Image (tube, helix red, strand yellow):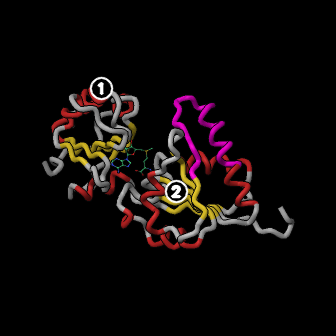
Amino acid sequence: MNMETKTGTLYGIGVGPGDPDLLTIKAVNILKSVDVVFAASSIKNKHSLAVDIAQPHISEGTDVRALPFQMSNNEAERGKLWEQNAKIILSELQEGRSVAFLTLGDSLTYSTFGYLLKIIKQTAPHINVVSVPGITSYQAAAARINTPLVEGDESLLVTSGARGGDELRKCGTSADNVVLLKAYKNVTDINSALKDANLLENSIGISKCGRKDEQIVRDVREFEKRKPDYWTLVIAKRNMACNK
Ligand SMILES: C[S@@+](CC[C@H](N)C(=O)[O-])C[C@H]1O[C@@H](n2cnc3c(N)ncnc32)[C@H](O)[C@@H]1O
């Protein structure tokens, strides 16, 4: 890098869960002006859903690049992959280019941007980072079913269903409202934990919210017969049926 070159800014952009109209004006303005757009993609085909969602807002001719990333339960493996990706992004920033890193939903909620942010903070703390929030999948899902997520003095637990009902059990079963993201594996166990928390009857599943093939499943027990897709969440409410 030329000593005179000013490093670029890194923008972590939440693109929302699917509908390109659900990006913030701030995100859209940044996408129009950045030099490079990065997004995590499948290792198999370099396809990035986040890029598809943001595409209408990315200026023609912008350098858009996929960073193949395999989700791994192995933390060391995951860390190594993200160190490689961070190096690629850093080299652009150090050349003075501005970079947007796209993530689905919100940029800091169970997001790949979180991994990147950690590494950049540790290895290149001089880089200017701007995190731009996005509409989360569960906010869009609640809107889709016209159901408040939380009201008055109620509590809202947002947790992961990746290990079945474990996280719900660990957090206790007293929350007034529960959102389970990653509710696609071990659905029988998720349902069993919802039942123990007296929430099963008042649960609703939403898959691919805001996308062409969106599905709303009014009885989450159906997921036991028909395994849901990765893009599935469950909203459960103690004091109100989810607009059933
Ligand atoms: C790694 S998390 C990403 C969460 C995202 N950053 C957010 O703010 O919503 C992936 C999980 O988010 C949920 N998700 C994301 N997009 C979704 C959509 N369009 N419809 C339903 N669930 C979605 C699913 O539970 C999926 O397993």
Residue 46 is situated, as x and y percent measured from the top left of the image, at 53, 46
Residue 172 falls left or right of residue 66 = left
Q: Residue at x 36, y 67 (%)?
A: 21
Q: Identity of the amino acid at label 2?
A: Leu
Residue range of the region highlighted in magenta in the rendering:
66-87
Q: Nearer the viewer, residue 223 or 178?
A: 223
Residue 218 is situated, as x and y percent measured from the top left of the image, at 17, 43
Q: Residue at x 51, y 36 (%)?
A: 71
Q: Is residue 72 above or below residue 143?
A: above
- The residue labelled by disc 2 is 102
Residue 118 falls left or right of residue 153 = right
Q: Residue at x 29, y 30 (%)?
A: 187
Q: Is residue 106 magenta?
A: no
User: CA–CA distance between discs 2 and 1?
Assistant: 32 Å
Residue 85 is situated, as x and y percent measured from the top left of the image, at 65, 46
Q: Residue at x 67, y 63 (%)?
A: 128
Q: Identity of the amino acid at label 1?
A: Asp
Residue lying at the far right of the rendered structure = 3
Q: Nearer the viewer, residue 50 or 224?
A: 50
- The residue labelled by disc 1 is 189
